[in-house]
């Protein structure tokens, strides 16, 4: 059943240039669709048209009546006094209204217990339960914790948050509202790995419809089941995730190129034949002109296939300097704190030539601080960081800054790289800065363009230790693939911080996982590391004590049946009382720690273990009771 129908959308922001040019497609109920396209292809414009924020020049959007649609980048205006918690609570406005109405009806029923009031109260209570009113606080905590909206952040004024933080809070609000159709525009941009995986798990269970614009290829592979690429203002369809899209796109390109080349060969053959017939006709046989014209008409009918356009790829490589010696970097007993907050302590790590290391961890664990220590921008509280004597570092920071942002791109290259104007233009051109673009001030560039310019400057210098801090942030898929090609050709030591799992899996041969002030040093790729973590978790579960109730009971029963039964029955009843008390304590702790995601997870494990033990004791008690009564 079609839930969304996009019919012939046309939208232009500049004269004679349509961003969307007759875009049409259908989305079925419950589908998860990835929307792809180059930056500027019209993806965000499409979403803004779908929510009514922008009106199309032509065409229309039809959404099934009664379906609620939410866009994370479309942030409502809230009163200045609203905290993050107030914003999250707006998702439960219907619940709060029902709560107030139920309270009002309960007050009335103290003096008037009429059937009409009872029916209205029962109806309101049923709707309250359907909307999840009894679990609203727990659900709010669950979603906030999953998206790493801390307790402290929830008390902050919403207006004082950064743009990324507002987007994260708005995503949480949309999830809490249980919106029917989610429009996600780069949803993972402001999430770390843990929060991204939480969102993916949520979307995989989400019963509604999802349309997602994303440059996170791992996210697209895991979440979407169908892909639509916006190309030249129109839609191209692929019936699978991102990996399917890549393979199918290449197959279509090769198929069209083969058809085009075959067609061109046939046209060349016919053209040669027509030319010969015209020549012979001039020599005295006019009838041959007619045959030549007939061939030319046939040629016009054959010209049906356009030459397929291959994607333009930036071709530039990191210059490399041969490394001599074994140790690129030694981290010896390094600790770092800010005030009372300790990021890490007593780190002992060595990087050798040619290693490719991914530094991963949740936001705020200290990844960027560790990079700054390596770069000498920060000093450790204890220990030391030592580079090898022949090491030359190239560093791409997460936040790009230029000393003279008002200079244009060309002058920036000339002053920084001390090169000729032609060399500067050639290098800028290889990074897709050409024509009048080179005269733009650096401050006018987007975040992704500034990253590209900084890389353009970095790649000139010989380097044997490359450090990248979130290198794919703010880049579209094509630009990410280009950086990957450049890194692929680089054979010296590489250390990078990234939340891009596709990038990590492609390049990391070693994982540094920073958590709880220490680093897990795993030698292997990202998927191998995930398997390692999974095995560790399973092993912990296997080491938990298990009750072999029936086995123990049978051994004792054979020795003295009647005495055993009475004694074991009393003991089992005492054990049941203890476990029931323990279960109540855990539930109380869950309420007290409802905003601490890590603590809640630990308590959930304890609760499950306690419940399993209690269930086993209930079974044991039933068996003992039956044996006592039969005895």
Image (spheres, rainbow, N blue to C red):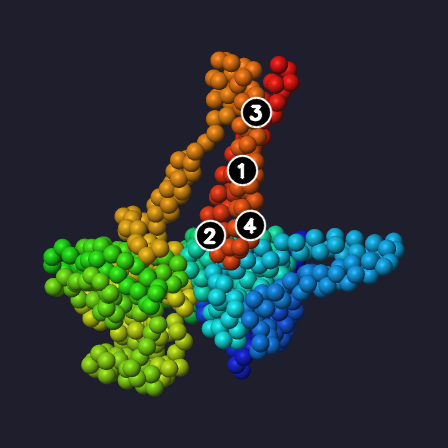
- Element type at mark 3: helix
Per the rendering, the mark at residue 599 is 2
Q: Is disc 2 in contact with disc 1, using a CB cutoff of under 8 Å?
A: no
The relative height of residue 417 versus residue 335 in the rendered view (above or below) is below
Q: Is disc 1 in contact with disc 3, using a CB cutoff of under 8 Å?
A: no
Q: Which mark sits nearer the N-terminus, 4 or 3? A: 3
- Residue underneath mark 4: 588
**Residue 76 image offset from top left, x and y in percent:** 59, 73
Disc 1 to disc 4, how far (Cα)?
14 Å
Other-residue count near label 4 (Cα within 10 Å), few / some / many at <14 / 14–19 / ≥20: few
Q: Which mark sits nearer the N-terminus, 2 or 1? A: 1
Quick one: quadrant of the C terminus? Answer: top right
- Residue underneath mark 1: 579
- Residue underneath mark 3: 569
Residue at the spot 54% in from the left edge and 79% down from the top edge: 13
The relative height of residue 59 versus residue 323 in the rendered view (above or below) is below
Disc 3 to disc 2, how far (Cα)?
35 Å
Q: Nearer the viewer, mark 3 or mark 2?
A: 3
Residue at the spot 58% in from the left edge and 26% down from the top edge: 621
Per the rendering, the mark at residue 443 is none
- Element type at mark 1: helix
The picture quadrant where one finds residue 62 is: bottom right
Q: Which mark sits nearer the N-terminus, 1 or 3? A: 3
Disc 2 to disc 4, how far (Cα)?
13 Å
Q: Report whether 346 appears left or right of 515.
A: left
Res 171 seen here: yes
Q: Is disc 1 in contact with disc 4, using a CB cutoff of under 8 Å?
A: no
Residue at the spot 49% in from the left edge and 51% down from the top edge: 600
């Amino acid at each position: 059943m079609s839930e969304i129908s996009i019919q012939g959308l046309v939208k232009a922001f500049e004269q004679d240039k349509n961003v969307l040019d007759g875009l049409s497609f259908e989305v079925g109920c419950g589908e998860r669709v990835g929307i792809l396209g180059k930056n500027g292809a019209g993806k965000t414009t499409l979403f803004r048209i779908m929510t009514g924020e922008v009106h199309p020049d032509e065409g229309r959007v039809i959404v099934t009546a009664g379906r609620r649609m939410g866009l994370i980048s479309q942030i409502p205006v809230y009163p200045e006094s609203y905290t993050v918690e107030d914003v999250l609570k707006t998702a439960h406005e219907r619940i709060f209204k029902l709560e107030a109405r139920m309270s009002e009806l309960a007050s009335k029923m103290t003096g008037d217990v009429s059937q009409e009031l009872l029916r209205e109260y029962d109806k309101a209570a049923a709707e309250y339960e359907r909307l999840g009113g009894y679990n609203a606080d727990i659900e709010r905590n669950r979603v906030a914790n999953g998206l790493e909206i801390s307790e402290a952040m929830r008390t902050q004024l919403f207006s004082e948050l950064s743009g990324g933080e507002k987007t994260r809070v708005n995503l949480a609000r949309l999830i809490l509202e249980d919106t029917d159709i989610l429009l996600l525009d780069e949803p993972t941009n402001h999430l770390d790995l843990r929060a991204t995986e939480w969102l993916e798990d949520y979307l995989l269970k989400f019963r509604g419809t999802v349309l997602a614009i994303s440059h996170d290829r791992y996210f697209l592979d895991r979440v979407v089941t169908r892909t639509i690429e916006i190309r030249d203002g129109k839609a191209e369809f692929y019936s699978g995730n991102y990996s399917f899209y890549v393979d199918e796109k290449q197959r279509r390109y090769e198929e069209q190129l083969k058809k085009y080349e075959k067609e061109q060969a046939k046209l060349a053959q016919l053209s040669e034949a027509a030319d010969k017939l015209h020549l012979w006709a001039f020599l005295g046989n006019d009838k041959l002109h007619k045959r030549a014209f007939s061939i030319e008409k046939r040629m016009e009918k054959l010209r049906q296939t356009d030459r397929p356009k291959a994607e333009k790829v930036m071709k530039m490589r990191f210059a490399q300097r041969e490394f001599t010696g074994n140790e690129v970097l030694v981290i010896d007993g390094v600790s770092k704190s800010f005030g009372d907050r300790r990021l890490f302590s007593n780190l002992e790590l060595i990087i050798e030539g040619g290693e490719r290391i991914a530094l991963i961890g949740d936001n705020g664990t200290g990844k960027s601080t560790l990079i700054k220590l390596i770069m000498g921008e920060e000093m450790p509280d204890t220990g030391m960081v030592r580079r090898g004597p022949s090491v030359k570092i190239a560093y791409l920071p997460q936040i790009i800054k230029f000393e003279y942002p008002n200079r244009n791109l060309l002058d920036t290259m000339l002053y920084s790289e001390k090169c000729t104007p032609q060399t500067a233009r050639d290098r800028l051109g290889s990074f897709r800065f050409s024509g009048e673009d080179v005269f733009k001030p650096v401050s006018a560039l987007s975040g992704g363009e500034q990253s590209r310019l900084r890389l353009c400057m970095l790649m000139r210098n010989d380097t044997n230790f490359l450090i990248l801090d979130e290198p794919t942030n703010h880049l579209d898929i094509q630009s990410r693939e280009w950086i990957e090609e450049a890194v692929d050709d680089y054979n010296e030591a590489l250390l990078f911080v990234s939340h891009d799992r596709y990038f990590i899996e492609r390049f990391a041969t070693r994982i540094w996982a920073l958590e709880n002030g220490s680093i897990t040093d795993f030698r292997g790729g990202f998927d191998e590391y995930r398997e390692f973590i999974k095995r560790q978790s399973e092993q912990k579960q296997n080491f938990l004590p298990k009750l072999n109730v029936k086995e123990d009971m049978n051994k004792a029963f054979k020795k003295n049946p009647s005495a055993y039964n009475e004694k074991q029955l009393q003991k089992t009843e005492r054990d049941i009382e203890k476990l029931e008390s323990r279960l109540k304590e855990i539930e109380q702790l869950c309420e007290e720690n409802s905003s601490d995601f890590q603590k809640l997870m630990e308590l959930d494990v304890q609760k499950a273990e306690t419940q399993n033990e209690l269930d086993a004791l209930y079974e044991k008690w039933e068996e003992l009771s039956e044996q006592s009564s039969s005895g």
